[in-house]
Structure formats: C-alpha cells, structure tokens
Image: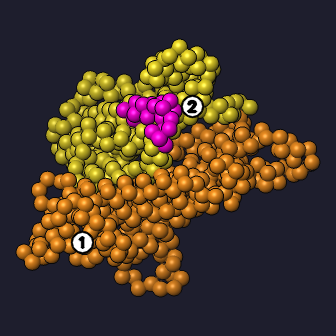
Chain colours: A orange, B yellow
Amino acid sequence: MFSKRNLVAYAIAFLFILVLNFALPRMMPGDPLMAIYGDEALIAMTPELKAQLVERFALDKPLWQQFGAYFLALFQGKLGYSYYYNAPVLSVILGRLPWTLLLVGTSLVLSTMLGIILGIESGWRRGSRTDRAMLAGLMSLNGFPDFFLGMLLLIAFGVTLGIFPLAGALTPYSGLSGLALVMDILRHLFLPVAALTLAHLANGYLLTRNTMITVLKEPYMLTAKAKGLSQRVLKYRHAGRNSMLPVVTQTGIWMGRVVTGALFVELVFAYPGVGYLTYEALLARDYPIIQGVFLMVAISVLVANFLIDLSYPKLDPRVSYAY
Amino acid sequence: MHIDLKKEIKESGPGRAGLIILLLMIAVALLAPVIAPYNPYQQSTASLLPPSWNHWLGTNQVGQDIWSRLVFGARTSLLVGFGVGILSTLLGTIFGVSAALLGGLYEKVVMRIVDAFIVIPMIIVVILISAYIRPSILTLILLLSLLSWQGGARIVRAQALSLKERGHVAAARSFGAHHFYIAWRHIVPDLGPVLLVDFIYSVRRAVFMEAGLAFLGITDPTVVSWGMMMRDALSFSYLNVWQWWLVPTGVALSLTIIGLTFVGHAAEPVIEPRLRGAEVA
C-alpha cells in the first residue's frame, strides 16, 4: 500500500515548486512584467501587447486571482512565451529535451549498473586490499565535480588527442543519415556520458557496498554457504540481489543529481540539451525559459520519486507490513 | 552512544588523510593574506602569462595572479561550506529535537516538510532564485542552509526519539523537567557525533554547490571563487593555459571535497553502527 504520509509530502513539494515559481518574479522590485518576461520583452513591448499580458496574468487583480490564473495556464500546458527565442517556452524546451534524456538516461543506467557490480565485488572482499583500494578510489572520484571531470576529459581526449569532438551533439550540416548518423551522435555523446557516469559512479557503489556488508552477516548467507552453493551464486544471487533493494529507493534521488549534473556537463561540452538551454537563458536573462526548465525538471524528479515509491513494495514485500 | 568519534576517524586511514587535507585547506584559507604574494583583485602585469618565478601559476585574462586567486578562493569555498554547515546543522537540530520531543501535529507537519524538501533537487531551486537575485556570500549561505537542513533533521529526530526513552530522560521528566531543559541537558549533548557527521556532509554539499553556482556565473562576481576561476579558464581551453590555470583550481576544489568525504565516511559508523568493522573484518 502506498502511504498517505508520502502523498502529503509530494503535495507539499509540488505546491512549494509552484509557489516559488509564481512568487519570485512578482516579488522583484519594479514592473512585474519585466521580471516575468526578461529584458528581451522590452524591445517587443507595445501598449497593446502590454495590456494583453496584464490581462493574461491578471496582474491588475488581487494576488490570489493572479495565482489562480497562473495555475490554470499551467494546467493548459502554457509555460509562457520566450521573447528571446520568439517561441513558446514549452516548444523550446521540448526541442532540447531529447538530448538531455539521452545523456541523463545513458549515464544513470551506466553509473547505477557499474556501481552495483563494483559494490558487490568490493563488499564481498570487505577489508581486503582490493576493497580498500576501490573504496578510496571511488570516494576520491566522487570528490571531483562533474564539470571538472568533464573539462579534464575534454582537454585530454578532445583537445590534446583529438579523438572525440569538442562540442555539440552532432556534426552540423554533415548530411549524414542512417548508421553514419548514429555513429556521429554516439561519438559526440561519449565524453559527456563518461564524465557524468564517472562523477556519479560512487552513489550506487557506496550504497551497495554498505548493504552488502550487512547482508553478508545474515544467517541465510551461512545456510547458503553450508548448502555448498558456488561462490558466484552466493555473491550475486543471494547477497547481491538483496543488496540492490536500497539502490532502487535511491535511484529517484540520484536521477535528480544526474539531471542537475547534466546541466553542468552540457555547459562544458556545449551539448544542446536542457542544461545548456538553462545556461543560455541565464546569460540572456530569459526568465520564462528559466522558470519553465525549473518547473519541468523539478516536477519530473518528483514524479520519478513517486513512481519508485509506488513500485517499491512490489520489490520488497516486507515494506507493506511496515505501515 | 558508546562510539568514540575521534578514535573512529583516527583509526581509519582515509579518515586521517581527509583530516590532514582539511586542516591544510583551513590553514591556507586563514593565512591567505600571508601566503598570497599579490592582491587577488589587483591587475598586476600582462595577462595570460605562463608560470614564472614572479607568478607561480601565471596570470589570468586580466593579468591577476592565479596563485593568489587560488589561495583566496579557499576562503570563499570554506566560508560558504562552514557557514552552511553550522547553520543547517543548527536548524536540523532544532527541528529534529523539537519534533521528537513535542510529537503530535507539530511533529507531523515538520516531518512532512522534511520529506518534501528531500525530494526537491536543491540546486535547481538555488539556480532559479539566483537568476533573480545575484546572491552575495551571506545570502548564499542563508539560502543553502534553508534548503539543506532537512536531511539532518531526519537523522537527529530518529536519534532523539531513541534517546528520549532512556532512563535518565524519564527520570528528569518525572522530576518535572521542562521540554527545553531536557533537550538542552540530556538530548543535545548525546547527539554530538551524529551532529558532526551531519555537519561534515552539509559542508561538503555547500562547497560543491558554491563551486557549481560560481561556475554557472550566478554568484557575486566581485568575490574570487574556484568555480568562477574554472569558468574563466574553460573559455581559454584551446590555449595551454589550462595546465596552470584550470587543473590546479580543479584539484584544489576536488581535494577539499575528497577531504570532507573521507572524514565523513570514517565517521559514518556513528549513524550506522552495523558498518563497524567493515574496514578490518
């Protein structure tokens, strides 16, 4: 059963995100339209347009009616209009989204899977030289900010060795298609994915290793060993599978981290995803885009966490008795 | 709580290494005016000079001494880190302990807020707010603290709930001790090690975030910071200046975070005693 407790927490988080997005531009000194639309709108602003916008945001009405108007517009999928791109915010973001999904998805899967495997191997050998070396190594790696790792990879493999492209997601105007296009995309994807994966490898590793150590002390491990099961079965099927449970609950939180990590890595590689879009918007003070990205990222992280919470009792039936 | 934190950290190899790195960084930050040969904001000589006897790490695009900026950057990182660490641990303790002791509706409200904030990706919130108000160092510390006390509050509350049931607390209560008295005399002193672990991780997170925000260029541009230096260096990555500009800065930042991670990890058995003996078993 999904708990009411979590539902309330998600409702609060959702409301906080909406209120913050609504209140920030309106709390700024000066014309709220300026804060909502950014500098670029000033050029396009005519009295008619201004009147129309005031009307749309109910800016001449009391605050609660303004919030109502804002809320209503959101549910109709209207995230606002970017005067910088001269296009609706939603379509600008959706245009960039596939690249970020590709980058984040690949890195999340790779870092989690590699992390689990390394965690199982390391926990199995706990206290040994290999374990201690892996632990120290991965914790050190964890200390490198993703953008620094990205820059190191960029300089080493892009600038110095020239094996990988320096920027972008594909070669512009190359007219490639089919397999050649896929290869081109993969070549551009490699370094950003490597940076993100390395930076977030320790998440899965540390957690799996910790659980592995406690699981190995369980009586059923002794029983399994006494049955004469092989090392591999003991390690992966008995200990490893149980060590993966906490990883599932954390993937939602990690997704949040990898998404924000992608923001920085995209900047380093000028990778045309949502993160780079945010950076461009920060430079141009294109507030509608910043707000739209904030809303979409925050809400998708919430939804991912929510879904993981929902699925968890199915993976570990013990949880449903806990309430 | 019969775990000696000092012993725990000293006995672990990485823990000791982490502590040494941290003390070194703190010393550099404190002695910055003594160590740095130039004023980090002063445009000393020609720009983009390679390393020389006068400028150990060369100069940047406007002719400021990179080594001096690196040394002063430690101040910004550690100031934000320790500022947020202290403030958010304080908030976490106040809300965690009070929730555990008072219970009822108050506890429910506080814990639901904690749960909510744990799922919101904090850095996005900070980026959004920073886009509107370029935060000064002080504002940044306040902002990060307000957004990062929740994890600590959860751990503190769990610990306080178990402490609350101990004999000496029940005894104090039967003598008519007030909530505040119990919290201050009997709960908080026993929370020590837990608070320290929470503190270390808060510092670590804040150092990370400050660097990230400065890298995005949304912190106070008049204060030198490692993230900002890396951002400047990145735009010259096609020159070979990265060797003495980007790499030392990135390494300084990473070392600080690694030091904090090592100390935090060595102290972690305090929160999760089942992990004890993991290093030696």
Give the magenta part as a residue range. Answer: B87-108
- Whether residue B23 is visible, yes or no, is yes
How crowded pointer 1 is (Cα within 10 Å; few <14, some 14-19, many 20+) is rated as many
Identify residue for label 2.
B161
- Distance, label 2 to label 1, CA atoms, is 50 Å
Using the rendered view, name the quadrant where residue A108 is placed.
bottom right
Q: Nearer the viewer, residue B195 or B37?
A: B195
**Amino acid residing under circle 2:** Leu
Q: Secondary structure at mark 1?
A: strand
Using the rendered view, name the quadrant where residue A34 is placed.
bottom left
- Position of A213 with respect to A285 (left or right) is right
Q: Main secondary structure of the magenta part?
A: helix
Q: Position of residue B134 (x, y in %)?
A: 22, 48
Q: Secondary structure at mark 2?
A: helix
Q: Residue at x 30, y 36 (%)?
A: B76
Q: Residue at x 56, y 17 (%)?
A: B174
- Whether residue B151 is visible, yes or no, is no
Q: Is residue B95 magenta?
A: yes
Q: Provide the chain ID for the residue under circle 2.
A: B
Q: Can you say whether A47 is above or below A22 in the image? A: below
Q: Nearer the viewer, residue A283 or A175?
A: A283
Q: Can you say whether A241 is above or below A217 in the image? A: below
Identify residue for label 1.
A82
